[in-house]
Image: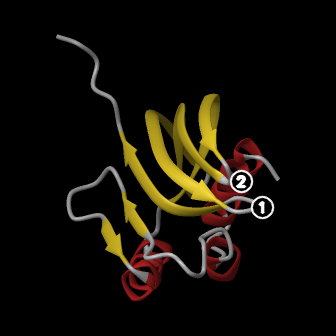
Amino acid sequence: MDVEALLRRLGEAVGSRDHEATLALFAPDASVVFVGSEAGEQAFGWAELRAWLDHVYARPIAFRWEWSRIETSSRGDVVWFLADGDVVETVGASESRTAYRMSGVAYGSPPLLALVHGSEPVAPK
């Protein structure tokens, strides 16, 4: 699995609120770090990542990511990535899109996530 497939699976797992599928995409032996785009949206380590997923999956808003561009660089089995696209938020039948950027580090074969950082880019003034 390449990084594009990894990020697609992450979007699908988060979009379907599947705890086990989401956690399976993170490296089990890493001190995982996830920093999202909302204030306070941080998880350092497995316990905080699980707690963050519990919190996010309990909200009425479901979300997923759709990527239009993914750039990678690698050395050995470590890959750095930058993905540009949209976060797609769904409440009932209503859907909205916001520009989103995600960067991170994955490693192994197949690659698994160790560090993820998301942001919502702001248009220049």
Quadrant in the picture for the C terminus: top left
Badge 2 crowding class, 10 Å Cα cut-off, few under 14, some 14 to 19, many 20 or more, is some
Say what secondary structure mark 1 lies in. loop
Residue 122 appears at what percent x and percent y?
A: 27, 25
Residue 79 appears at what percent x and percent y?
A: 60, 46
* Residue 64 visible at all: yes
Q: Quadrant of residue 11?
A: bottom right
Residue receiving disc 2: 6
Type of the residue with mark 1: Ser
Spatial separation of the CA atoms under disc 2 and disc 1 = 11 Å
- Up-down: is 94 above or below 72? below
Q: Nearer the viewer, residue 49 or 27?
A: 27
Q: Is residue 3 left or right of residue 51?
A: right
Residue receiving disc 1: 109
Residue 23 appears at what percent x and percent y?
A: 61, 77
Q: Between label 2 and label 1, give the one nearer the viewer.
A: 1
Name the residue at 60% across, 64% down.
14
Say what secondary structure mark 2 lies in. helix
Q: Residue furthest front?
A: 76
Q: Quadrant of residue 113?
A: bottom right
Identify the mark nearer the N-term, 2 or 1.
2
- Up-down: is 27 above or below 112? below
Q: Quadrant of residue 108?
A: bottom right
Q: Residue furthest bottom?
A: 47
Type of the residue with mark 2: Leu
